[in-house]
Image (cartoon, grey):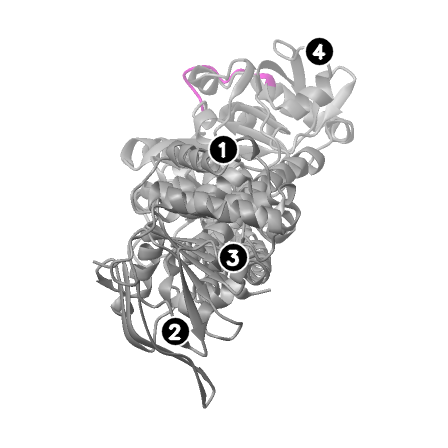
Amino acid sequence: MELIELHNICKTYYLGDVSVPVLNGVSLNVAKGEFVALMGASGSGKSTLMNLLGCLDRATSGEYWLDGQEVSRLSLDQRAILRNRKLGFVFQNFNLLPRTSAQDNVAMPLAYTADHLSDREARQRAAQMLGRVGLQDRMDHEPSQLSGGQQQRVAIARALVNRPQILFADEPTGNLDSRTSEEILAMFQQLNADEGITLILVTHDAQVARHARRVIHIHDGAIVDGAFLECGEPIAPAAALASGVK
Amino acid sequence: MTVYRIFKTAFKALRRNPMRALLTTLGIVIGVGAVIAMMEIGTGSSEAVQSAISSMGANVLMIVPGTAASGGISFGAGSVTTLTPEDCEAIMKECPAVRIASPEVRARTQVVYKQRNWVPFWMTGTSPANLEVANRAIAEGEFFTERDVLNANKVCVLGQTIVRELFQDEPAVGKEIRIKNVTFRVVGVLAAKGANMMGMDQDDILLAPWTTIKYRVTGSSLTNTNQSTSSSSSSSTSDSVNTLSNLYPGQTSLYPEKSATQTADNPLPVRFANIDRIMAAAGSTAEIPAAIQQITDLLKERHRIRPGEPDDFSIRDMTEMTKTLASTTTLMTNLLLCVAMISLVVGGVGIMNIMLVSVTERTREIGLRMAVGARPRDILRQFLVEAVVLCLVGGAMGILFGHGGSQLVHLILRWPVATSPAAIAAAVLVAASVGIVFGFYPAWRASRLDPIEALRYE
């Protein structure tokens, strides 16, 4: 069974009386453990699609099945719980809480988790996640004391702290130089390979999209190619893929 | 999310901008501080009034002689002395609601000790029961006894003011003072009581057995306060008065003998010993109406007043005065409290204003929190708790400032203050509700934000 299934998704924004169709019948599948890049020019609708996939928004029409659940029918609160449990987000501008330590930033989503972790457990989990992104010695630093790459790694640790199935990255390297971008993308590949986390990367940069196993091209609210994994094509063994890139 | 973690998150968010949090909460600090200070000073002054009243004697009824009337012309209250010491004894014996009663005979004249002299504001002849009725205490020596009353012994008890004026630093007990050339031995000194509600010095008092005052002091004149002029101007008569006064009436014949003519002229027993008033203490505040009724019935019977005839006495209830004075202070306190409450509301508006700014400023944070799984109600709760925490911190500071302020007033102006736990509890409650009321709108606005818009907000 596919992790993500979109059937004929349409999204139309209404600006007063004018209706602006952004997505016109998008259908796509993403299997568990895939590393997919969503590519398209700005205004192509890739951000809208990403918001829909990330359960931040609801489609005007169509069906969205996420892990066997029809997301379009879920309430605001149910979608919030879904985001908390199954999804992680990494943003272009990091979106860390200012004047808050890296550890507290990472522990933040745990505050909204239904399973009650004690304060100490939450901090432990946060420390563990920071260790995983290589920032174990920067736990008490505030975002302003960290470099861009480090900030993005804190953001990744925050996205991973609830052990999500899917990680959404919206232009994660947009504010980073090429060397740090490589590091961050390598980290994504590693996460995909080692932990089997499904990754969906939104970018307009072909260089970045190259790191993904599959690239979905969007143009004018419709998918041009890459909507479905070709039959028989194996989900690439991540280790091989990672080494292949290098 | 546990309550502890909610509050911790709120504290962390506020700590990111401590100066602003402090300034925001200043309105609450001032409001709560004003409320606490007002309450403490108000409670203090009403307690002071209460203690002033109870220092005059708790639940005391004053029975004074009524008006004399002759041929339809009344002479005003106190124009006759119709009360007798027997009335007082009867009240004590026959009125169950009266705990204790004592007769009082008033005089106003000069007291002399060596080369010093003083005219006490109160020179009262009474019985030992007065100590309890008027809520007095003995500081040194002892009070005179029933036996002293029966024998009209020349003993007296002095208030602190007289002791200071006559004896200065000398010990007063055992000394002899002269009142109208009658020598009195000081057997005791009363504990200080301070001024009463009307501002009269309650320590400017001389207490002696009522028989002594009646027969040895006021025997001649009530109006003449200067004994040197009285003795010099009427030296011939004063000698005789003094001689009479100096006589011991003896244990058996307390009252002057009736002459044969007197007995013949008055078929009814004549009240030889009239007293100026009777002070009666009711068992409790609740028993005061019963006590008034019982005394009225008893005195009507004793004074042979037929139904329909006006009473020849009147009973004054001191608790009426208590209520009036207490309600005045309560009114003032409540007025000031209203003003303080207005400043709390102003403080609340300040909180709302800054919380709205804070919500706008932290739009991205709200978007992020929603993206990682905060439900609208989580956001609502977070901002609400922040406002409440602000108000509670302000409230705590206000309590400290208010309490400190009232203590300062107490130290500098010597106003009576009283710490009131009820006021502190009320202040905390009011501060929290101000936080909830004025924090709700900004928090609600925050919870209504669209996560996508909020994340993109610059």
Answer with mark 2 or mark 3, whichever residue precedes in sequence.
3
Q: Chain of mark 4?
A: B
Q: Look at mark 1 in the image and give the residue it sits on.
A: B104
Q: Residue furthest bottom?
A: A17
- Do marks 1 and 3 both belong to one polypeptide chain? no
**What residue does disc 3 label?**
A208
Give the foreground label among 4 and 2. Answer: 2
| Cα gap from disc 2 to disc 1, whole angstroms | 111 Å
In magenta stretch: residue A187: no
A142, above or below A11, in the image: above
Choose between A39 and A167: the one closer to the eye. Answer: A39
Q: Is residue B239 left or right of residue B308?
A: right
Numbered range of the magenta stretch: B246-257
Residue A223: image tag: 2
At horizontal 36% and vertical 40% (from top left) the residue drawn is A194
Residues at marks 1 and 3, CA–CA distance in whole angstroms: 108 Å
Q: Closer to the camera: disc 1 or disc 3?
A: 3
Question: Given this view, does label 4 or label 3 mark the residue nearer the observer?
Answer: 3
| Image quadrant assignment for residue B307 | bottom left
- Which label lies toward us, 4 or 1? 4
Under mark 3, the amino acid is Val
Residue name at image x 40 percent, y 37 percent? A122
- Residue drawn at x 47%, y 36% is B274
